[in-house]
Image (cartoon, coloured by chain):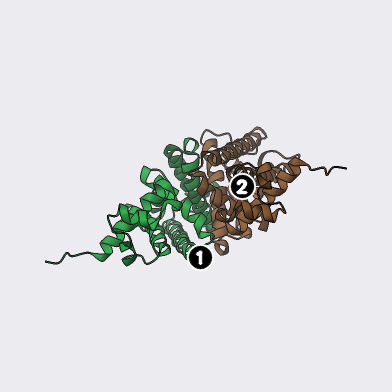
Chain colours: A green, B brown
Amino acid sequence: MPKIVDHAARRREIVEVAWSVIAERGLEAAVMRDLARECGFANGALSHYFPTKGDLLRAAWEHVFERTNERIANSTVGLRGVDALVQFCKQVFPMTLTAQAEAKVVLNFWQRALSHPDLAEVNDKAMTTWRAFIRQCLEEAQTDGVVTTSAEFDIEVAVEELLAMLMGAQMLAVLTPDAHPPQLQERMITTALQRHVRTQDTAVN
Amino acid sequence: MPKIVDHAARRREIVEVAWSVIAERGLEAAVMRDLARECGFANGALSHYFPTKGDLLRAAWEHVFERTNERIANSTVGLRGVDALVQFCKQVFPMTLTAQAEAKVVLNFWQRALSHPDLAEVNDKAMTTWRAFIRQCLEEAQTDGVVTTSAEFDIEVAVEELLAMLMGAQMLAVLTPDAHPPQLQERMITTALQRHVRTQDTAVN
């Protein structure tokens, strides 16, 4: 009986290997020959799945966002508004060892995206999705009367502030870990989201 | 008369060249031979100023922070509290073409700092300085009665939120420039700082 190879599963396996090599040793270390060996392939067999190193790196970069988005989807089942946003922040903030390894991969790719438009596109698409997600949650919270609808509340700024904070945390958590521990990140999430909740309205009205 | 060479000025000149090569073409492009040529040196003469590429890169990385810190110092003369903090944010946020070029250099170095402890140290030192600066401004504002001193105000979180937002903006402004323009950054600064100003206390008391 011929050996059945699940092409998609194999691709995913290669991407996982590439991903962990990048997290541990950086993008320079992601050499096709070494990756093939780590996957148990003969030299050159990788190209059946990823014709060029560029293809593999793009897939590895997409994989980071896919993993995060899977965690977001799983943790927000049945939630909306601020509750969904809390879970979103917890998945994007580098609070766990896995998310910290992802943050290292992220720093590698941000740098490379500066000179590789296809990688910049992956990042841009993810940022667009996350901006839309945050905005939708805030709008749901407004609909539910949890977040203010006052004219002073600038939802575009609220979205961008939260996104920028989450992105900055990718660097701070891996390059200044002692000053940016998970417990502090927890308090940052609570503070950032609680402030939008309508206590001010109540005080003023 | 022998030619007088100002060693410090020459070093600075080399660092400026390295800096702009990195901003335009990335760290990979910062090859000693090419940098020597761009500085008008004979091949090898660079080593008189920087024995290794590592020395030059460290100096270029420190230079980014020095430039930013000079701008901060100049723009905050005679200011304290929230006013000083507004100026600080305006210098760190990538709002100008220069600051956007710096942000590209920053993304290059964050990646490299993951595997080069001496570069991580430069970053760590700058982050420590900036955390202290933000905290001092907030404490001055508290002393002046501008920012709340209520037990609910978590100054450590306020510092880290602002720093994370400023660091995340380095990436968002260069990799997603259309969605993160200077006008939006202006509104982010206003919103982030205005919220600490004591209107809530007034409403409650």
Q: Could you confirm whether marks 1 and 2 are on the same chain?
A: no
Q: Horizontal placement of B121 versus A170: left or right?
A: right
Residue positioned 75% across, 41% down in the render: B7
Q: Is residue B51 visible?
A: yes
Q: Is residue A187 above or below residue A126?
A: above
Residue positioned 38% across, 61% down in the render: A56
Q: Which residue is mark 2?
A: B194
Q: Nearer the viewer, residue A88 or B98?
A: B98
Looking at the picture, how far across and down is residue B107, in whole percent? 55, 52
| Mark 2, other Cα within 10 Å: few <14 / some 14–19 / many ≥20 | some
At mark 1, the secondary structure is: helix
Looking at the picture, how far across and down is residue B90, in whole percent? 66, 50
- Quarter location, residue A66: bottom left
On-image quarter of the C terminus of chain B: top right
Which amino acid, by three-letter code, is at mark 2?
Answer: Gln
Circle number at residue A117: 1
Q: Residue furthest right?
A: B1
Q: Is residue B76 above or below residue B101?
A: above
Q: Is residue B87 visible?
A: no
Q: Horizontal placement of A117 versus A67: left or right?
A: right
Looking at the picture, how far across and down is residue B40, in whole percent? 72, 54
Image mark 1: chain: A
